[in-house]
Image (tube, rainbow, N blue to C red):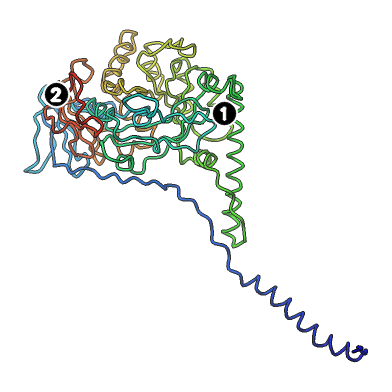
Amino acid sequence: MALTRSRISIALAFFIPAFLSGCQSTQSSGKDTEQAEKVSIDSNPFPSTYTPIEGQPTVITNVTVIDGIGNKIDNGMVYFADGKIQAVGKDVDYPDGATVIDGQNKWVTPGIIDNHSHLGVYPSPGIGSLSDGNEMTKPVTPGVWAEHSVWPQDAGFARALAGGVTTLQILPGSANLFGGRSVVLKNLPSRTMQDMKFPDAPYGMKMACGENPKRVYGQKGGPMTRMGNVRGYRQAWADAQDYMRKWEKYESETAAGKQSKAPKRDLDLETMAGVLKGDILVHMHCYRADEMVTMMDMMKEFDYQISSFHHAVEAYKIADKLAQNNVCASMWADWWGFKMEAYDGIRENIPMVDKAGACAIVHSDSDIGIQRLNQEAAKAWSDGQRAGIDISMADAWTWLTANPAKSLGIFDKTGSLEEGKNADLVLWTGNPFSTYTKAEKVYIDGGQVFDLNDPRMQPQSDFEVGQSAQGENQ
């Protein structure tokens, strides 16, 4: 049927309102659409499940006390209860019914803190199938977490406990420029890593400079030089800054009620962003003085803080710069010369760093050395004495307690025998700077976890059952 002009007018009269109505409906539905749910990231997806073992109110009397922050008390007393240090001094009050231990001729100190350990990620037995500390697939791997490699059955934990170690930082290895996150553990042997995890301890991030990344990646696409190392760090930090800006923009837009698409998560950049925000602490494997200064320049360029240089055999050359930049040096007493970057090590390194006012730390980096860290500190102290560096034993003990606690961000909780702090302490059979002294009793959060004279209080992992070695428990 042919449409006349009048019929067309009638048809349009019905069509146009319907069309406009449809447009209005579409527009209003956009306004009524609910805002997309905000994306947030759980910063603690693997929380600690650590539970302190039960302890009894205990007082140690007639004992030489080193409090971990530079003080020594002869014929002193330490009282602890409810998992905390309650009182330290010449004469302290304690309730009836408390367990009393006569510390005559013995010494008590805070528990040793090793801020550089690979127990659990390079456990005993040291075989390839248990070698889980280095993700040597590319030079930048900050997104891996050491805790996901920790094997709680490592016999080394119990050996370290027998040496008075109550807290330790487990680090990835040093093959990569960025090796991954570290984790701080209470040295209470347990079934799972989570049960050992130090509650609320900050994460660390392992970095490495010098020979190791060059050696590992020199024939695999680089870096193959020290300048290549630095370029690799700087590019990664620049990428992390860009990643942060994207998330900051997303946060500000969503806070303003705007529609905004969340950036794609990148686990490597997420860890590095945590460093830039101050939530994650940098622990950097570095030997040479010139490289440590370059690394401190870089930390200023990208506005983050290095907590500690590890190994740092040339720290004595720049001790004043370490102090100025608030960077600790975690060192061996006498390891040196095993590669070129370790060639200029000296036995007076640790006391010289201390004397300059910098934060000096004795660390192990060894499943053997961690068993005798008191002796490592004693060696460094005595080498300083022979060189005319007069440091008291009480001050030298800070290398094993207060200073590593500071480097790990846990000094408010442990590292000294001060009222209100965790009752992590060791009763020694004698002067802990003596080769002949052993840890007699070890306490973590006030619960006794080791006793030299009671085999029932000498932890043994499942892996060791039925495999007692010659000389064990003797």
Would you say residue 362 is visible in this rendering? no
For residue 83, what is the image quadrant?
A: top left
**Residue 108 image position (x, y, % from top left):** 19, 28
Q: Amino acid at mark 1?
A: Met
Please indicate whether residue 192 sits to the left or right of residue 100 in the image.
right
SS class, disc 1: helix
Please determine whether, in this image, residue 423 is positioned above or below residue 39: above
Q: Which quadrant would the C terminus be assigned to in this image?
A: top left
Quick one: which residue is furthest to the left in this view?
96
Please determine whether, in this image, residue 284 is positioned above or below residue 336: below
The residue at which mark 1 appears reads as 298
Residue at image location 46% in from the left, 10% down from the top: 343
Task: Give the distance between the C-alpha atoms of the residues marked 1 and 2, in whole angstroms.
Answer: 47 Å
Residue contact at pointers 1 and 2, CB within 8 angstroms: no
Residue at image location 22% in from the left, 41% down from the top: 84
**Residue 170 image position (x, y, % from top left):** 37, 32
Please indicate whether residue 314 sits to the left or right of residue 225 in the image.
left
